Image: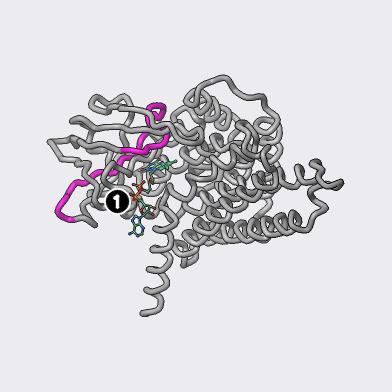
């Protein structure tokens, strides 16, 4: 496994591993609400310097350019400790990466340092009530008026809605040209016409909700790249970050396997530890094999991203598809090994069972990943 990493990666892995053990796994339950916990986590992760890995060094980051392997190592470990901590870290990356990718120097200077420290919570606003997997059916409009753009529309399922300061927003500047008609903008939450509508409670703690743009005027210098670059920016952002969703799945699955092994060695039935029975051993072996394969696929995709090698879209989708589907099976088996204790509210595996579900949906559902993989392979088949 370590052949994917340099010494800095290995040092980062050691540091985040012990931080997660101390601050997430051994920490007492928080009595704050979800938004309060989320804000506290961003602040802690910022202070520890972990969020700095989401932006380039020149703008408050750690490395010259953002590395998918750093993001994966951090998500892998954070998800092992807390799905909410993983989400809050991941959103700083997803919300700011379009700026890193397509912003000009002034935009990077204006927005990225505050994201890197956790002072500004970031968000990525693509999905709409009528535009989920089919993002080109987007209805949000950005119309130029003099030196401004006026945004109108609604975005749904936006992580960090209501607590983010800096939103990357995708809107149609030319609705007649679906592919070249989308543009990307940076919108600050205190802009008049930016409205936080409501939170959406999910099965697992995750700050998320609906936002609206009601004649929201932003200066034209808040566009990222050129008019029409929006789709390219959104897809390139997702190509880099998709494997990190796989990394979060690996972290959750690792925790599930750890819990299953521990429980199977402590619970006794029929005069033996559960681990004595071959049916339990087979489950553990299958979970470990799926986990190992997931991890290899995730870090392979991240390595391809960091080295600019061809095939990123295909490998990143394969990693996300396999790792998130495998994590669901692994968590389910871990819960099964716990018997009735696994479905008791508050049990670690019960929480993992709820936490793991959304990974197969966001940043492209498993079905969409299959469409992407097949399209890439069929394209190659023709050439
Ligand atoms: C926890 C969570 C966090 C999220 N955070 C964000 C965020 O921060 N920003 C943001 O912009 N969005 C976010 N989303 C939205 C997410 O990206 C969408 O939910 C996702 O893209 C799917 O869209 P949808 O929910 O509208 O489902 P739909 O697109 O309506 O799909 C419903 C079902 O139909 C299937 N389907 C659709 N089209 C096809 C097809 N052509 N072939 C086969 N099957 C198909 C899908 O795979 C799915 O199973 C988040 C979602 C969740 C659950």
Of 370 and 246, which appears nearest the observer?
370
Q: Does any portion of residue 14 appear in the rendered image?
A: yes
Q: Is residue 297 toward the left or the right of residue 230 in the image? A: right
Question: Is residue 167 covered in magenta?
Answer: yes
In the rendered view, would you say 325 is above or below 127? below
Disc 1 target residue: 135
Of 92 and 154, which appears nearest the observer?
154
Give the image location of residue 169, x and y in percent.
31, 40
Snapshot colouring: one colour
Q: Is residue 25 toward the left or the right of residue 130 in the image? A: right
In the rendered view, would you say 185 is above or below 244? above
**Circle 1: element type:** helix
Give the image location of residue 58, x and y in percent.
48, 41
**Residue at the spot 52% in from the left edge and 30% down from the top edge:** 42
Image quadrant in which the C terminus is located: bottom left
Give the image location of residue 148, x and y in percent.
18, 35
**Residue at the spot 16% in from the left edge and 40% down from the top edge:** 143
Of 332 and 177, which appears nearest the observer?
332
**Residue at the spot 26% in from the left edge and 38% down from the top edge:** 221
Give the image location of residue 72, x and y in percent.
57, 49
In the rendered view, would you say 199 is above or below 185? above
- Tally the marks: 1
**Residue at the spot 44% in from the left edge and 43% down from the top edge:** 94
Question: Is residue 7 covered in magenta?
Answer: no
Q: Does the residue labelled 1 lie within 8 Å of ligand 1?
A: yes
Image-quadrant location for residue 282: bottom right
Which residues are drawn in magenta?
156-177
């Amino acid at each position: 496994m370590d052949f994917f990493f340099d010494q800095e990666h290995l040092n980062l892995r050691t540091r985040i591993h012990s931080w997660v053990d101390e601050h997430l796994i051994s920490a007492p339950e928080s009595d704050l609400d979800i938004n309060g916990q989320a804000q506290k986590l961003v602040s802690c992760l910022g202070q520890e310097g972990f969020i700095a890995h989401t932006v380039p060094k020149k703008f408050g980051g750690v490395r010259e350019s953002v590395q998918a392997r750093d993001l994966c190592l951090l998500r892998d470990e954070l998800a092992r400790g807390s799905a909410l901590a993983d989400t809050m870290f991941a959103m700083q990356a997803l919300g700011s990466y379009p700026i890193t990718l397509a912003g000009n120097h002034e935009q990077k200077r204006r927005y990225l340092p505050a994201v890197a420290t956790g002072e500004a919570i970031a968000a990525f606003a693509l999905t709409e009530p009528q535009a989920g997997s089919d993002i080109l059916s987007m209805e949000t409009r950005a119309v130029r008026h003099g030196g401004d753009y006026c945004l109108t529309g609604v975005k749904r399922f936006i992580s960090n809605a209501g607590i983010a300061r800096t939103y990357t927003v995708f809107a149609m500047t030319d609705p007649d040209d679906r592919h070249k008609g989308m543009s990307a903008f940076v919108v600050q939450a205190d802009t008049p016409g930016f409205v936080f509508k409501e939170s959406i409670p999910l099965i697992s703690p995750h700050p998320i909700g609906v936002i609206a743009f009601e004649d929201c005027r932003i200066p034209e210098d808040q566009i990222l790249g050129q008019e029409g670059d929006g789709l390219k920016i959104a897809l390139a952002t997702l190509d880099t970050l998709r494997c990190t969703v796989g990394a979060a799945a690996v972290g959750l699955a690792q925790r599930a396997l750890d819990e299953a092994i521990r429980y199977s060695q402590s619970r006794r039935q029929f005069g033996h530890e559960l681990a004595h029975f071959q049916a339990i051993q087979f489950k553990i072996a299958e979970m470990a094999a799926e986990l190992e394969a997931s991890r290899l696929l995730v870090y392979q995709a991240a390595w391809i991203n960091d080295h600019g090698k061809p095939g990123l879209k295909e490998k990143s989708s394969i990693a996300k598809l396999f790792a998130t589907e495998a994590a669901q099976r692994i968590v389910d088996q871990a819960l099964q090994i716990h018997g009735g204790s696994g479905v008791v509210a508050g049990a670690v595996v019960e929480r993992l069972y709820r936490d793991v579900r959304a990974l197969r949906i966001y940043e492209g559902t498993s079905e969409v990943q299959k469409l992407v993989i097949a399209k890439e392979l069929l394209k190659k088949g023709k050439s």
